[in-house]
């Protein structure tokens, strides 16, 4: 592909065509619906006003889990559904969704205690159809998690869940949908909805990159904008029904917070679960769960949330003496949760919902793990508007990966096949020999930058470094030290001149400083660990 060209212009030229389905929202929910729709012969278009996975789907806790915490709330159906989808993802997206072993310390006087926790794990394993749980004596547990607090340690449980690169999961899902003829365009905003006697029938769109307006028509409009779903709903006069909740996270260098197993604990302040686990070569800590009212601004961690997470670390890893200066980066995301009137945000349900209102199908809530279930439920609700009955039998999440040359480094081979599936060999063949090694301090290869810039609708530097790759999170100061080499790649693939590159760098580094770093305000002191 020549510098500066992409398929975006060709996709924009198709907007005037009639569509069966238009999906508003480029996160995992919208991407999943696009994939499942196009698999069934539905002519579908996805639009996203920012970048793909810009919202919740690049800022989750990265866990593909069954939701042990939901058992406590009696949500057996949600837990069973999530565990079974987790198992399917581990099989069909191996490498992109990876198994992760967790340990939970059993401390004298701490809740929930060995027997209650073991009961939950037994149900978990029953849903999965295999046993992964085990109880370890203190000496054995400390072999698995040597840095945890030993005070009053009686032993601990080990169990299995999974993790992923959430933004990459969205991109892989969109890639798969495009193989079936789906169209996905980022930086294309839904300005207003069109209506006829049957209700919503299309939308007025505005291209955020050019300012050009477009009119699109479809049999069914799907509102898959997650925490922002009430915006479109309220434009039709519908009442607000969602409760956006913010979850914030800290990332540490792995050498500073080394965890071979993920470590989970109940926060001493409020009993909420907190996880510490290895991810993409660093250690990730999360999460908080707070009401988030301002959806117009990009979310960021607050000083109080930093203190909250640091308190959990001091409680579980007292001998490491971790400090905010050790933090590599931070991020915050907003979860779409259906409001039920609970005073405590953590007690709100995590089920997804589908509402068909005046022809607009809103899909919101739910979990990253169950994106396929959510998509199939949305298609079930859309059948009347589509005028056809669909076979909604679930199939494999993704197509098999293409073979790669014999003798290729095992880690690189695994990573390319996991991220690019049928296009893995093309991604390898298109790369330069000098790009087939890892970027220092990460699991990311230089060739991933070239592939993304050339083929994955990158419009801004933040798209490349925060979502197509995660280098902005994995490297200190957003990866400022590697920008000269990144410049050579993007100028060769995207055709940016020096002025454009400089403007993008300034924009990106300002974003890193304000939204992906520690807050500039003072961080409140956290309590001294005690039982």
Image: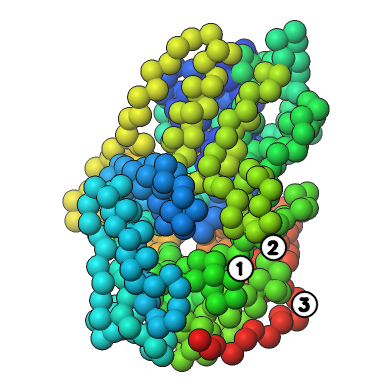
Q: From the image, tell me which residue sits under label 3.
A: 521
As rendered, which of 399 and 307 lies closer to the eye? 307
In the figure, residue 425 lies in which quadrant?
top left
First reached walking from the N terminus: tag 2 or tag 3: 2
- Residue 88 at what x, y percent from top left? 32, 42
* Residue 478 visible, this orientation: no
First reached walking from the N terminus: tag 2 or tag 1: 2
First reached walking from the N terminus: tag 1 or tag 3: 1
As rendered, which of 127 and 212 lies closer to the eye? 127
The disc placed on residue 300 is 2
Q: How did the renderer colour the structure?
A: rainbow
Q: Is residue 312 above or below residue 279?
A: below
Query: 10 Å neighbourhood of mark 3: few (<14), some, or many (≥20)?
Result: few
As rendered, which of 341 and 66 lies closer to the eye? 341
- Residue 277 at what x, y percent from top left? 43, 69
Residue at image position (42%, 57%) is 68
Query: 10 Å neighbourhood of mark 2: few (<14), some, or many (≥20)?
Result: many
As rendered, which of 102 and 185 lies closer to the eye? 102
Residue at image position (68%, 66%) is 301
Residue at image position (58%, 85%) is 323
Q: From the image, tell me which residue sits under label 1.
A: 330
Tag count in the figure?
3
Q: Residue furthest left?
A: 406
In whole angstroms, how far apart are the C-alphas of marks 2 and 3?
12 Å
Q: Secondary structure at mark 2?
A: loop
Q: Secondary structure at mark 3?
A: loop
- Residue 146 at what x, y percent from top left? 34, 84
In whole angstroms, how far apart are the C-alphas of marks 2 and 1?
8 Å
The disc placed on residue 511 is none
Q: Is residue 416 above or below residue 423?
A: below
């Amino acid at each position: 592909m020549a510098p500066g060209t992409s398929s975006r212009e060709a996709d924009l030229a198709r907007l005037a065509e009639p569509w069966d389905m238009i999906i508003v929202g480029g996160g995992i929910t919208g991407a999943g619906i696009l994939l499942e729709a196009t698999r069934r012969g539905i002519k579908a278009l996805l639009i996203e006003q920012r970048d793909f996975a810009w919202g919740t789907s690049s800022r989750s806790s990265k866990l593909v889990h069954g939701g042990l915490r939901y058992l406590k709330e009696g949500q057996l159906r949600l837990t069973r559904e999530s565990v079974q989808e987790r198992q399917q993802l581990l099989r069909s997206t191996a490498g992109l969704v990876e198994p992760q072993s967790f340990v939970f310390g059993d401390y004298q006087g701490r809740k929930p205690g060995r027997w209650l926790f073991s009961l939950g794990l037994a149900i978990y394993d029953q849903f999965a159809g295999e046993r992964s749980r085990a109880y370890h004596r203190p000496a054995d547990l400390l072999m698995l998690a040597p840095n945890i607090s030993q005070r009053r340690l009686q032993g601990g449980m080990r169990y299995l869940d999974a993790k992923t690169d959430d933004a990459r999961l969205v991109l892989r899902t969109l890639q798969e949908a495009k193989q079936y003829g789906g169209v996905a365009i980022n930086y294309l905003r839904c300005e207003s909805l069109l209506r006829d006697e049957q209700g919503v029938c299309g939308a007025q769109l505005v291209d955020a990159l050019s300012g050009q307006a477009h009119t699109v028509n479809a049999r069914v409009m799907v509102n898959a904008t997650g925490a922002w779903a009430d915006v479109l709903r309220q434009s039709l006069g519908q009442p607000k029904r969602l409760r956006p909740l913010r979850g914030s996270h800290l990332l540490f260098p792995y050498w500073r917070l080394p965890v071979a197993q993920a470590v989970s604990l109940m926060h001493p302040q409020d009993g909420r679960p907190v996880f510490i686990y290895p991810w993409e070569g660093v250690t990730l800590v999360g999460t908080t769960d707070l009401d988030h009212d301002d959806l117009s601004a990009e979310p960021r961690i607050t000083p109080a949330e930093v203190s909250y997470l640091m308190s959990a670390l001091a409680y579980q890893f007292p001998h490491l003496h971790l400090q905010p200066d050790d933090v590599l980066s931070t991020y915050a995301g907003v979860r779409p949760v259906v409001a039920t009137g609970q005073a405590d945000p953590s007690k709100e349900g995590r089920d997804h919902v589908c509402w068909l209102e005046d022809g607009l199908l809103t899909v919101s809530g739910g979990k990253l793990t169950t994106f396929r279930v959510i998509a199939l439920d949305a298609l079930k609700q859309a059948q009347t508007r589509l005028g056809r009955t669909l076979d909604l039998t679930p199939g494999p999440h993704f197509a098999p990966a293409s073979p790669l040359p014999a003798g290729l480094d095992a880690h690189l081979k695994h990573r390319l096949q996991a991220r690019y599936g049928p296009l893995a060999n093309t991604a390898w063949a298109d790369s330069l020999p000098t790009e087939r090694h890892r970027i220092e301090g990460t699991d990311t290869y230089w060739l991933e930058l070239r592939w993304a810039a050339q083929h994955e609708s990158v419009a801004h530097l933040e798209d490349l470094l925060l979502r197509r790759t995660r280098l902005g999170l994995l490297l200190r100061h957003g990866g400022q030290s590697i920008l000269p080499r990144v410049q050579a790649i993007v100028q060769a693939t995207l055709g940016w001149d020096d002025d454009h590159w400089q403007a993008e760098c300034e924009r990106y580094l300002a974003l890193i400083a304000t939204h992906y770093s520690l807050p500039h305000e003072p961080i409140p002191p956290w309590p001294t660990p005690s039982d």
